[in-house]
Image: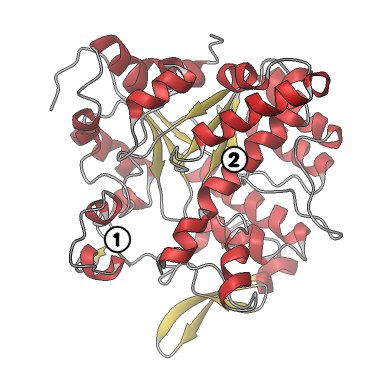
Amino acid sequence: MKTVDYPIYDVDRHFYEPPEAFLRHLPKEFRKDFQYVQVNGRTKLAVGGVLSDYIPNPTFDVVAAPGAHEDWYRGKNPEGLSLREIGGEPVPGDPAFFSGEAHLKVMDEQGIHAGLFLPTLASVIEERLEHKPEAIAALFGAVNRWLVEDCGLARDDRLFPVPMVNLFDVDKAVEELDFLIKSGARVVGIRPAPVIGLKGGRSFGFPEFDPFWARVSEANIFVVLHVSDSGYDKINRWWTAGGEGEFRPFEKNPFAEVLDWMGRAISDSLTALICHGVFDRFPNIRVASLENGSDWLEPLLLRLALNFKKMPNAFKQDPVETFKKHVFVSPFYEDPVARLIELIGVERILFGSDWPHPEGLKTPLDFFKDINHLNDAQIKRIMHTNMKGLIEGARD
């Protein structure tokens, strides 16, 4: 491992939510919308009254080991093993997977000074409750209050949980955001997908959501767009299953992967922010794309550049430059980081380990091996300076 003289900042660390994270503060009228139920002796999750296999074991009493799927994602799978096969035996849930205090101790062991702390199971909520957005807000509010009580939103000024906000009702979203800011939040998360609505989705870049973006700007916090169930697997199921079923992220097939449910969602989301003028109206907004990889990045920049030439009057400023100014990207460990530097500059690239998820790195600082071709100044930017600046509200 490379020896450095600066603290490491990890933008993508996770916790597994225990049932009480959702249930402790969930109002009674929404209890039937999120239930842990017994099916053939196993605990399963029912969302909106429908059993879900999105997360096969929603209690996380046993999980895939951290980094267990790394070879699969690096393309080192000549035998064609499934994720389950390549990941080996599951491991018992560790306190560091659930508790902020225990997680900090593991960060010390790993050589990580500070990190974002992102939910896992919460990503099941929005797509399955789009018909009942008030339940989404209630569930997010419940998890956020559990986080405040059990961890704090800036624990020891090192661990920074990412509370989620749903924008269906912008007034309630701002009310929730105010609670989070008063509770010490440095960052909030929104799903990279259209805002759900009873008549269909709409862009969170539309002016109707300006009260939310105005409050983010005023508070000098940043917004995370982390991979989620953004609904894009509907395209896969449209082609293969008549639109039936649900997204199961651990059941891989080549058709769905080539369709790029992940890259399309984040590309469209960032396009909405740019083309619908959020960064024009709020020039201090900063957005970070986490665990979405970067395969989508160069094609998106090319499309933005081409359409700026076709319709220059549709943009108040060069959209590619807008992207470079406002958007940060955390690449996968298998991504070509040197090429990303050419595209958006090293000032906009973040290190994220995805620990303790199986698709992440078992040993977070192994990422140094993936960027050992960069110079020391570039490495420090990625591993330290960029996230430190976001947390501290720096504008560069």
- Residue 93, disc: 1
* Residue 219 place in picture, x, y as percent: 67, 20
Pick the front one: 256 or 371: 256
Residue 76, compared with residue 38, is above or below; it is: above
Query: Secondary structure beneath disc 1?
Result: loop
Q: Is residue 328 left or right of residue 235?
A: left
Q: Residue at coordinates 24% horizontally, 33% vertically from top-left? A: 367
Dot 2 or dot 1, earlier in sequence: 1
Measured as percent of width and height from the top left, residue 83 is found at 30, 65
Query: For mark 2, does the 10 Å Cα neighbourhood hold few (<14), some (14 to 19), or many (20 or more) residues?
Result: many
Quadrant of the frame with the N terminus: top left
**Residue 327: percent from the left, percent from the top?**
56, 25
* Mark 1 burial class by Cα count in 10 Å: few <14, some 14-19, many 20+: some
State the separation of the CA atoms marked 2 and 1: 34 Å
Between 96 and 381, the one lying in front of the other is 381
Element at label 2: helix
Q: Is residue 300 above or below residue 227?
A: above
The one nearer the camera, 286 or 212, is 286
Q: Amino acid at mark 2?
A: Ser
Badge 2 is on which residue? 267
